[in-house]
Image (spheres, rainbow, N blue to C red):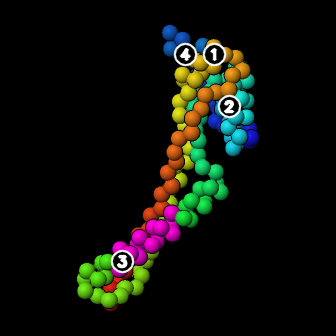
Amino acid sequence: MEVRSGAFGVSPRYGRDGKINGWQGSAELVLEGRDVPLITATAGKLSGLTVSSMGFSLSRDARRQLESAVQAQAIERFRARAAEVTQAFGFSAYTLGAVSISSTDEGARPMPRMMAMEARAAVADAPLPVEAGTDTVSVTVSGSIQVR
């Protein structure tokens, strides 16, 4: 498990008269790793801190491997489509022009944990209730062909 600090902010607190009567701060503590039971147990033991969000995402290695597989599929679909278009126009072959390959990394989508915090208040030091979802890996292959 990796533990690091996240965002930090301080802002003024105003009274009814519109003047600053104090300061309010917030700080993030980020728990990250593959051991979900350890992370949720640790988060459950952090008294005085509020869990505001949590998220799941693929590891860098898993995302890289999946992106490579999806990229190969996208390239094969591009080639198949190019061959279809070439034949539809009555030509026998094509050559590639400019090709662009891009991927999007949606990463972890934080999920608000308000209800989990209410449940946590009732049971001290209890692990946070969590459930993994799905992640999206998207690769786009676009380009131009010259038919001949």
**Mark 2 or mark 4: which comes first in sequence?**
4
Q: What amino acid type should be assigned to the residue bearing mark 1?
A: Ala
Q: Earlier in the sequence, mark 4 or mark 1?
A: 4
| Mark 4 or 1: the one toward you | 1
Disc 2 residue type (three-letter): Thr
Residue occupying image coordinates x 32% and y 89%: 92
Task: Name the spot of residue 34 as percent of width and height, x first.
Answer: 69, 44
What residue lies at 74% left-to-right and 38% top-to-bottom? Answer: 3
In what element is the residue under mark 2? helix
Which quarter of the rendered picture does the N terminus lie within?
top right
Residue 109 visible in the picture: no
Pointer 3 residue = 82
Spatial CA distance of label 4 from label 1 is 29 Å
> How crowded is the residue under tag 1: few (<14 C-alpha within 10 Å), some, or many (20+)?
few
Secondary element at tag 4: strand
**Spatial separation of the CA atoms under disc 3 and disc 2:** 49 Å
Residue on which disc 1 sits? 121
- What residue appears at the point 40 percent right and 85 percent down from the top-left corner? 95
Would you say the residues marked 3 and 2 are in contact, meaning their CB atoms lie under 8 Å apart?
A: no
Q: Is residue 16 magenta?
A: no
Mark with earlier residue (4, 3): 4
Residue occupied by mark 2 = 40
Q: CA distance from mark 2 to mark 4?
A: 36 Å
- Give residue 26's quadrant in the image: top right
For residue 9, what is the image quadrant? top right
The question of residue 73 being in magenta is answered with yes
The residue under label 4 is which amino acid type? Answer: Tyr
Q: Which mark is residue 14?
A: 4
User: Which percent across, then down, holds residue 19?
Assistant: 55, 14
Q: Residues within 10 Å of mark 3 (few under 14, many from 20)?
A: many
Q: Judge depth for marks 2 and 4 and give the one in front.
A: 2
Image quadrant for the C terminus?
A: bottom left
